[in-house]
Image (cartoon, coloured by chain):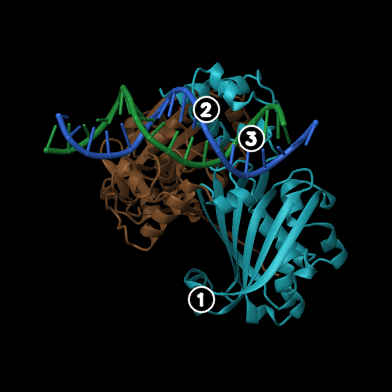
Chain colours: A brown, B cyan, C green, D blue
Amino acid sequence: MARYEQIADALRHGIRTGRLRPGERLPAEDRLAVRYRTSVPTLQRALSELVAEGLIDKRHGVGTFVRTPRRRVERSSDRHQWEKDRARRPRAERLRTGSTEHDTGLEVTDLAFHAEYRETKADEDLAAVFGVHVGTRLLERMYRTNCRAEDTPFALVHSYLVHDLVAANPELLDAANEPWPGGTQNQLYTIGIELDRVEERITARPPTAEEAEALGLRKGVSVILLRKICTGTDGRVAEVSDVRLPGDRTELVFTTPLTRW
Amino acid sequence: MARYEQIADALRHGIRTGRLRPGERLPAEDRLAVRYRTSVPTLQRALSELVAEGLIDKRHGVGTFVRTPRRRVERSSDRHQWEKDRARRPRAERLRTGSTEHDTGLEVTDLAFHAEYRETKADEDLAAVFGVHVGTRLLERMYRTNCRAEDTPFALVHSYLVHDLVAANPELLDAANEPWPGGTQNQLYTIGIELDRVEERITARPPTAEEAEALGLRKGVSVILLRKICTGTDGRVAEVSDVRLPGDRTELVFTTPLTRW
DNA sequence: GAGTGGTCTAGACCACTGT
DNA sequence: CAGTGGTCTAGACCACTCC
């Protein structure tokens, strides 16, 4: 076993057994290198293993810290039916709850929300999913939701709608109306669209530099990519969302009911 | 931007534009280091970025190659109902198809299959899921499925059953009966268990050294972790599976139907 | 044995943070 | 400013693969 793996194991063990406690700061790299009789780059390679596993956090110019286990967010497939049911509830009720609260169990007041809209054109990929021509005008909506107590968002969402379709209700084109009470399914309801099913496609990969930045991830931690495709009762794709979730803090839950024999 | 990132970008660009073609071998690291006027460790760091992204493949003692995009495997949530329907079909029909074929579209003859059984005791985690005492005897079944044309498996599966429950049919205790025609749902059928629903919990992280080995992944590529919890019509958990999937080759698909307004 | 990637060293300089 | 992590070097030796 490589030296850096042995060192990673030793530190991992210290963390798991609680000898190194959450929040505690590790000795500086040069001192750890001396302690483990190795060079700084080798020690750093050991640390980068632990960063990838989400066990420690390095802060440039500050130090290396044992990570406090962060709240894991469950994102359940039940949410879609829940959102659909909510979409036609009275405005007052819709105001009280959002789906992120539904996922996390946090209160509305714990959460910070950011939305941004822009107009874009369908590339090949999106055109194929929507079943429209390449270049069709789309409304691109970008969201991020934060827990006020933490600095990094739960998710980065890019949601796409066919521009000319949603333009039927001009309020839907203005990000100033976010967070929209009742969410996307209520928005679609205002233009006469009812959803029939939601398809989600999931894969995972290491984050790009940009994603690492935005989600507060370190290189080496995984990003879960989720593409949500919402199909209306008319059989047309109404919304496509690309969601990027931090792999070390997210658990997706899907329940498939089976018909009885 | 760091030197190693610039070099990674340059190589990435060469691959994306097709200047470096799939399967092509890159010059040796020491020569690349000279070309990019850098040291070998720095050049290696650039390459390790590309490995993480699945763009290249390094083979110790052989060389570094532009990766041929591998077949992506879709694993759809429809499979559960499909498997349930199949479980009571005639043996001849069950023999013809397995669920991996269902996922991949490959023929039975394209696939290699490996199974191993052992007895184990429920740890805290599994005991909680099954709703049994810690230490309860479990049957642990380990599977891997390969495409004959490729060297690395699609998935590593550890499946758990309550030992004393399945012992009702002794054939279920013997790995020599694998691949069992009709799969787990047929096996459960032989001991009078019908499944009511399947819950799947998904997360992602970098692979451990052991997983990287078994799935043919490089460190830095992501592993998708899927825990499948199968609940019987009696409300008891019948099977728990932990599935590890290569993030760069797997797409999970879940469809959630919604009730009409 | 020749050529390849895997690992490691000892030291250097830079960039960032907090005082 | 001192202390921290981020990056890089030039060279070394080892392990693996293939001829």
Pick the front one: A174 or B24:
B24
Residue B186 vertical position relative to residue A232 in the rendered view, above or below: below
Q: Position of residue A199 (x, y in %)?
A: 58, 45
Q: Nearer the viewer, residue A83 or B220?
A: B220
Earlier along the polypeptide chain: callout 1 or callout 3? Answer: 3
At horizontal 67% and vertical 59% (from top left) the residue drawn is B80
Please indicate, yes or no, whether residue B102 appears anywhere in the rendered image: no
- Counting residues from the N terminus, which is met first, the one under dot 2 or under dot 1? 2
Chain at tag 3: B
Q: CA distance from mark 1 to mark 3?
A: 44 Å
Query: Disc 3 versus disc 2: distance between alpha carbons?
Result: 17 Å
Type of amino acid at the residue the image marks with label 2: Val
Q: Which residue is mark 1?
A: B131
SS type, badge 3? strand
Q: Circle 2 marks a residue in which chain? A: B
On the rendered image, what quadrant is the N terminus of chain B found in?
Answer: top left
| Residue B125 locus on image (x, y percent) | 48, 69
- Image point 27% across, 52% down: which residue? A23
Q: Quadrant of residue B98?
A: bottom right
Q: Which residue is mark 3?
A: B57
- Disc marking residue B40: 2
